[in-house]
Image (cartoon, grey):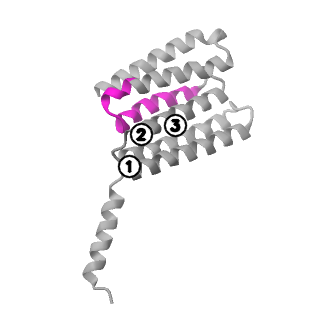
Amino acid sequence: MIPLGSLRCRSAGREARAARVLPSVRAASLRHFAIVAAAIVAWRMNRVDSGASLLVLLGAGAVANLATAVLAERHPEGWLARGLSCAVGILTWAALVGVTGGAPSPLVAGFWLEIALSSIVVRSGRIFVVVCAAIAALWAQQWFLGVGGALTTLSVESGFLLATGALTYWA
């Protein structure tokens, strides 16, 4: 027979672990919900040529996002988990933006979310790295689609990403 006191201690330990949600896990959850919501909006707005490509992106993004959350859970102080978390987010948003038409897509706002989430995941000095990665991903995905008439849009969006990064850094 197990004494009642030991059951309380065990359940209290489980509750304490459950209440302690790591920032990188919280950011991964927020990112996943935002990406799924954005994909649903893109599908409803008929911005996606093929629903299959959207499902593949969602699946790959979900698996990669889950992997970074598990890595962060196992190594909470690890710089690798935090860096991978931001990289997965930026790459997933870049793929979604590319599938939904490039720079004119409303899903470019996902990069702003990623910069804001970086304040939860990385040190404030590394927010600039996340901003540069978001700008590089924005330009790279548009490069594959053709820069042509999107140069002005890319420049303005890059400015917004820099401003978002500056506000996130000083906030």
Q: Main secondary structure of the magenta part?
A: helix
Report x, y in % for residue 40: 62, 40
Identify which amino acid the numbered label 3 is placed on. Answer: Val
Identify which amino acid the numbered label 2 is placed on. Answer: Leu
Q: Residues within 10 Å of mark 3 (few under 14, many from 20)?
A: many
To which residue does mark 2 refer? Answer: 80
Nearer the N terminus, badge 3 or badge 1?
Answer: 1
Report x, y in % for residue 116: 40, 32
Report x, y in % for residue 120: 35, 38
Q: Residue at x 49, y 33 (%)?
A: 87
Q: Which of the 4 image quadrants contains residue 79?
A: top left
Direction from residue 64 to residue 101 in the image, left or right: right
**Residue sticking out furthest to the bottom:** 1
Residue 119 painted magenta: yes
Q: CA distance from mark 2 to mark 1?
A: 9 Å
Where disc 3 sits, the SS reads: helix
Q: Nearer the viewer, residue 81 or 153?
A: 81
Nearer the N terminus, badge 3 or badge 2?
Answer: 2
Q: Residue at x 43, y 27 (%)?
A: 130
Reply above or below: 48 against 8.
above
Q: Residue at x 68, y 30 (%)?
A: 47
Which range of residues does the magenta coloring cover? 106-128
Where disc 1 sits, the SS reads: loop
Direction from residue 129 to residue 36 in the image, left or right: right
To which residue does mark 1 refer? Answer: 75
Where disc 2 sits, the SS reads: helix
Image marks 2 and 1: residues in contact by CB distance under 8 Å: yes
| Image disc number at residue 88 | 3
Residue 82 painted magenta: no
